[in-house]
Image (tube, rainbow, N blue to C red):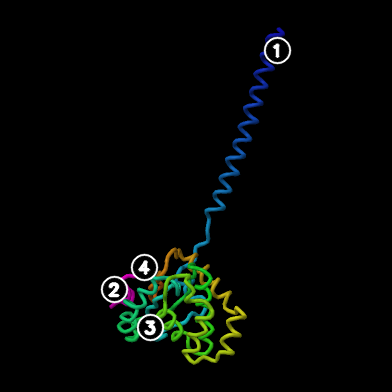
Amino acid sequence: MKLDRRLSAGIIGLIILIATVGGVLYFKSESTFNQLSSSTIVATVNPSELLKSGSPPVRGSLNASVTIVEFGDFQCPTCGAWYHEQEPLVLQNLVDSGKAQFEWRDFDFFGPDSVSASEAAYCAGEQGKFWQFYDIVYSNQQTPNSGWADFVHLQKFAEQLGLNMTQFNASFQSHKYAALVNMNYALGTQLGVTATPTFFVVGASGRIVTITGDQPYSVFEASVNSLSGT
């Protein structure tokens, strides 16, 4: 009888233990599921709407049905190669013809001088010479982080363009465009930019063609034509 009672008590204890452990495991698994669920549910935003944010520098007709958005870094050698080899064809045949407009957004990851170059370009833009500054920086591009894009050299570029240096220096030293630089980097990251240059060719309907790297002019022409219906 004592053996039976002990056996019964042991069985009951085992059942309680199994139930307790099972409950804990269930709770943990359910908790883990909830955590995974909450981490994988991400609000989807239309990329074309994201690319409409802000007021980036623009070349070309605002009535163009297609927009080419470049995320670039002034110190990026691949960006420099595209600037010299492909951009002139894109501007002449697609932008100047009215088929597309061209926007530039900085995506600075080569170092502090990349950020300085972008901020300086925006400061030049205050005096109506963003694109002239853009041109002179890319035309003088050298090895990244070799000092060619530090503030001393950026000041020389501004002087060559005939900018009001008092205004330029005050604007740059206030770092008034630091927030814009950070916003562009965050936007690029959100859009999946991992290298420069990265281009988003956006049609009027919101369709997007993504182009990465120093691609030939023909790729841009085909993308613009496919989105403009020509």
Residue drawn at x 65%, y 26% is: 17
Q: What's under tag 3, amino acid-wise? A: Ala
What residue did someone put label 2 on? Answer: 222
Is residue 207 visible to the viewer in this orientation of the structure? no
Q: Position of residue 116 (x, y in %)?
A: 53, 76
| Residue on which the image places disc 1 | 5
Lower position in the chain sequence, tag 1 or tag 3: 1
Q: Position of residue 179 (x, y in %)?
A: 58, 74
The amino acid pointed to by label 2 is Ala
> Mark 4 is on which residue type?
Gly
Sequence-wise first label, 2 or 1: 1
Say if residue 189 shows up in the picture.
yes
Local packing at callout 4 (Cα closer than 10 Å; few below 14, some 14-19, many 20+) is some
Report, in whole angstroms, how far the alpha carbon at label 1 lies from the one at label 3: 89 Å
The answer to whether marks 2 and 4 mark residues whose Cβ atoms lie closer than 8 Å is: no
For the view shown, which residue lies furthest in the top direction?
Answer: 1
Q: What's the CA distance linking mark 2 and mark 4? A: 16 Å
The percent position of residue 133, horizontal first and vertical second, equals 46, 84
The outermost residue toward the right is 2
Answer few, some or many: residues within 10 Å of disc 1's Cα (few below 14, many 20 plus, some between 14 and 19): few
Callout 1 secondary element:
helix
